Image (tube, rainbow, N blue to C red):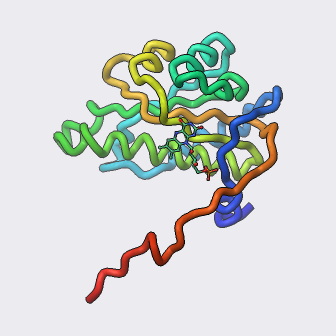
Amino acid sequence: MDYFEVTNERHSTRAYKNQSVEPEKLQKILEAANRAPSAGNLQAYEIYLVTDAKHKIALVESAYDQEFLAQAPIVLVFCAHAARSVGKYGKRGADLYCVQDATIACTFAMLAATALGLSTVWVGAFDEDEVRRVIGASQAHRPVAMLPIGYAAEAAHLKPRRRLNDLVHQVQS
Ligand SMILES: Cc1cc2nc3c(=O)[nH]c(=O)nc-3n(C[C@H](O)[C@H](O)[C@H](O)COP(=O)(O)O)c2cc1C
């Protein structure tokens, strides 16, 4: 798939087959995330890899019963790590850049998964403290996105988007 096929075909999947993800595919996904840009190249985020049933079931509870988190063979939890950014960028690093770093890395992982024939859904609705407890992260790591990854067990459904002339605002010269 070329880049535009990947972005056009990516869609949220909320039902996964009981089929594991090949380790080499997971490796490629993690390497893609690691290529994401970050403020000052500080990579102010951490990735937690969750694969066992007990922790995935606990993540379901922390995410208000989003059951598909337990179906997917892999859940990546992207956490902002403010301390890595605050030294260089102060409050902007702590409040914004570390969150952006984590979310861009998650986006790279999501698109890499699509390119490899896998499915995902971005999960942002969860109790941060609960997720932190489940993955064993310290207060320094703020969970900002979870990404279940696996093989889809439901038909693809591409949702409509806003029209570009509504979304894009030409700034007049
Ligand atoms: C910041 C963010 C938070 C989201 N949180 C959730 C979530 O908690 N649960 C869920 O099922 N989908 C979640 N989504 C997925 C969106 O619902 C989905 O991307 C959107 O409806 C567009 O559909 P598509 O991904 O199929 O194009 C989230 C997406 C984003 C970007």
- Residue beneath the point at 26% across and 89% down: 173
Q: 14 and 46: which one is in front?
A: 14
Query: What is the x, y in percent for residue 132?
Result: 43, 18
Quarter where residue 17 is shown? top right
Which of the four quarters of the rendered structure image does ligand 1 lie in? top right
Q: 59 and 79: which one is in front?
A: 59
Query: What is the x, y in percent for residue 146?
Result: 53, 33
Query: What is the x, y in percent for residue 26?
Result: 68, 36
Q: Extreme left residue here?
A: 90
- Residue beneath the point at 58% across and 44% down: 109
Quick check: 60 above or below 159?
above
Quarter where residue 60 is shown? top right
- Residue beneath the point at 43% across and 52% down: 37
Q: Extreme top residue here?
A: 54
The count of marks equals 0
Position of the N terminus by quadrant: bottom right
Q: Extreme bottom residue here?
A: 173
Instruction: Classify residue 68 as left or right of residue 83.
Output: right
Query: What is the x, y in percent for residue 6?
Result: 68, 59
Quarter where residue 19 is shown? top right
- Residue beneath the point at 67% across and 15% down: 52
